[in-house]
Amino acid sequence: MSTLTTAFGFPSTAAEVAEGIDLTGRRAVVTGASSGIGAETARALAATGAEVTLAVRDMAAGRRAAEDITARTGNREVRVARLDLTDPASATAFGAAWQGPLHVLVNNAGVMACPERYTDQGWEWQFATNHLGHFALATALHGALAADGSARIVIVSSTGHQQSPIVWDDVNFAFRPYDPWLAYGQSKTANVLFAVEATRRWAGDNITANALMPGAIYTNLQRHTGGRGRVPAHLIKTVEQGAATSVLLAASPLLEGIGGRYFTDCNETGTVDRRSGTLDGVARYAVDPDNGRRLWALSEELLAHAG
C-alpha cells in the first residue's frame, strides 16, 4: 500500500484544496461547525455547492455561522441541527431525523485537556465527546452513508494521540489519577482507530474513513490549555490552513476509495514507534487493526449500557 501524497502542504488553505471541486447535489454534515476549523470546513464545502448541515450544541451560534457561510458563498443550502456529543440519545435522534443519503460526515467537534469531568454514564468527558459521541453519530447515520455508495467519514484527530494509547482496563480513569493530556491523547487515539475499523467493517458499503492532524491552530479548543506557547510560532496555522486537510479528505477525488489512513498537512504520514517530537507521525498502536476491532466492541458495549 503506497503512501498517498498530494500537491498540497502546510501552507495550503481549505479554499485552495476545494478549488475546482463541484459537490453540487451532495450532502455533508460537519460537527462542531459553529466556530474554528469546523466553521471553515463547512464554508469550504458549501463553496463547492454541497448541502451542508452544521451539527452543533449551541443552536444560536450555529445559526450565526450558517448565515455567515451563506453570505460568503451564496449557498443557501446550509442548515443547522442540534447535536450534543456527550448525550448518546442526541446522536441517536440526529440519525433518526436524517432523511435520504449522506455523502460526507466530518467528525470535527472536540474538547482538549479539559478539567476532570464525567458524563451521566460515568464516561470520562474527553473520551465521551471526542470518540463515543462521534461513534454513536456515525453508527446512527450508517444507513444514510451506505445509501450513497461512496460515502466518506473524516475524523479530526491530533498528534496528541502520541500521548497515550487506549488504556483498556481504565478508559474512564476510575483507578488512575486523572491527567488531562493523557485523557486527550487516549481520545485522539480512539479517533484514528475508528477510521481504521470503520473502513474495514463498512467496506461492503463503500464507506471510507480517514483521520487527520489539522495542525496547531489557535481556536476555542485551547481554552483549557493555559494559552499559547506549547508550539513554536512557525508551526502555527491559520484557521483556513487548519481546515485544509479535512476538506481534502472530504472532497478531493484523490481520496476516492482510500480509507483507514492518517494525514497531516494534506499528506499521509508514516507510522512511528515512539513520540515523534514533531506534529507528524501516527503511532503504530493507533492504526493497529486488532486495536480497532477491540475499540469498536468496547464502544458498542458502553453505548448499549448507556440507559
Image (cartoon, grey):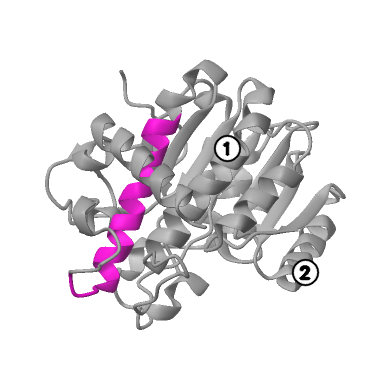
Going by the numbered disc 1, the residue's amino acid type is Ala
Q: Residues within 10 Å of mark 2 (few under 14, many from 20)?
A: few
Disc 2 secondary structure class: helix
Any part of residue 257 in sight: yes
* Quadrant where the N terminus is found in the figure: top left
Q: Earlier in the sequence, mark 2 or mark 1?
A: 2
Residue 193 drawn in magenta = yes
Residue 173 x, y percent position in the rendering: 25, 67
Any part of residue 265 in sight: no
Residue 306 x, y percent position in the rendering: 48, 56
Q: What residue sits 51% from the left and 74% below the top?
A: 220
Q: Quadrant of residue 122?
A: bottom left
- Outermost residue on the left side: it is 274
Q: Is residue 203 above or below residue 279?
A: above
Depth order, front residue of 11/273: 273
Please give the count of numbered marks on the rendered protein: 2
Q: Which residue corresponds to mark 1?
A: 250
Residue 223 x, y percent position in the rendering: 45, 79
Q: Which residues are magenta?
A: 176-198
Going by the numbered disc 2, the residue's amino acid type is Arg
Q: What residue sits 38% from the left and 82% below the top?
A: 227
Q: Which residue corresponds to mark 2?
A: 64
**Magenta stretch: helix, strand or loop mostly:** helix
Mark number displayed over residue 206:
none
Q: Quadrant of residue 279?
A: bottom left
- Outermost residue on the bottom side: it is 226
Depth order, front residue of 279/304: 304
Residue 194 drawn in magenta = yes
